[in-house]
Image: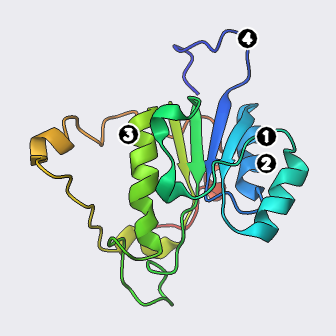
Amino acid sequence: MHDDQPHRGRPLRVGSLFSGYGGLDLAVEHATGGETIWFSEINTPSIRVFAHHWPDIPNLGDITSVDWATVPPVDVLIRGFPCQDVSTVGKGAGLAPGTRSGLWAHMAAAIDALQPELVVIENVRGLLSAPAIRPIREGATPDARNPDDATGDRATAVRNLEPGPWLLGDEPG
């Protein structure tokens, strides 16, 4: 994590989207010393397991109806959104609106609104070559939608979360 942004002695606040049973949450809490403060999940069995590990945090529910202006801020935003449409064994629909994997746009909206220090995304390898289409907001120009360079030096830097290069995933194909 950034040493230049102190957290006033408190643990990093973690927000969890597409939370499932909380496996990624446990890993991120362990790796960062953070604390999950809210989650967003609609699958009832998954909610029960998640709530067992974090009984006192709120479930924001369906990500498509969350008003991000009312959500407590987080330092770390995590998740692996649905992979069916970007998986090599899926239909290849990509990240288009209306697909399950297209729910990515709602995670992007959360990132835009919450501006966390760190975003952890877990998904299948097919995500790297999936077509991405983000809905255009009415009246938005390309410059207004993308005011900053999304690939700055800090955007893709690994920040002391992996103890060895063999844990960073597959080598490039």
Kind of residue indicated by mark 1: His
Determine the secondary structure under disc 1: helix
Q: Residues within 10 Å of mark 3 (few under 14, many from 20)?
A: few
Residue at 67% across, 47% down: 39
**In this view of the protein, which residue sits in the foreground, 10 or 52?**
52
Q: Label 2 vs label 4: CA separation?
A: 21 Å
Residue ID for mark 4:
9
Q: Residue furthest right?
A: 52
Residue ID for mark 2:
26
Q: Which mark is residue 73?
A: none
Kind of residue indicated by mark 4: Gly
The answer to whether mark 2 and mark 1 are in CB contact below 8 A is yes
Q: Residues within 10 Å of mark 2 (few under 14, many from 20)?
A: some
Kind of residue indicated by mark 3: Asp
Q: Quadrant of the N terminus?
A: top right
Q: Label 2 vs label 1: CA separation?
A: 6 Å
Q: Label 3 vs label 1: CA separation?
A: 26 Å
Name which of mark 3 and mark 1 comes first in the sequence: 1
Q: Is residue 90 left or right of residue 108?
A: right
Q: Label 3 vs label 2: CA separation?
A: 24 Å
Q: Percent from the top left, x then y, of residue 100?
A: 47, 75
Kind of residue indicated by mark 2: Leu
Residue ID for mark 3:
112
Q: Which mark is residue 30?
A: 1
Q: Nearer the viewer, mark 4 or mark 1?
A: 4
Q: Nearer the viewer, mark 3 or mark 1?
A: 3
Question: Vertical placement of 10 versus 140: above or below?
Answer: above
Name which of mark 3 and mark 2 comes first in the sequence: 2
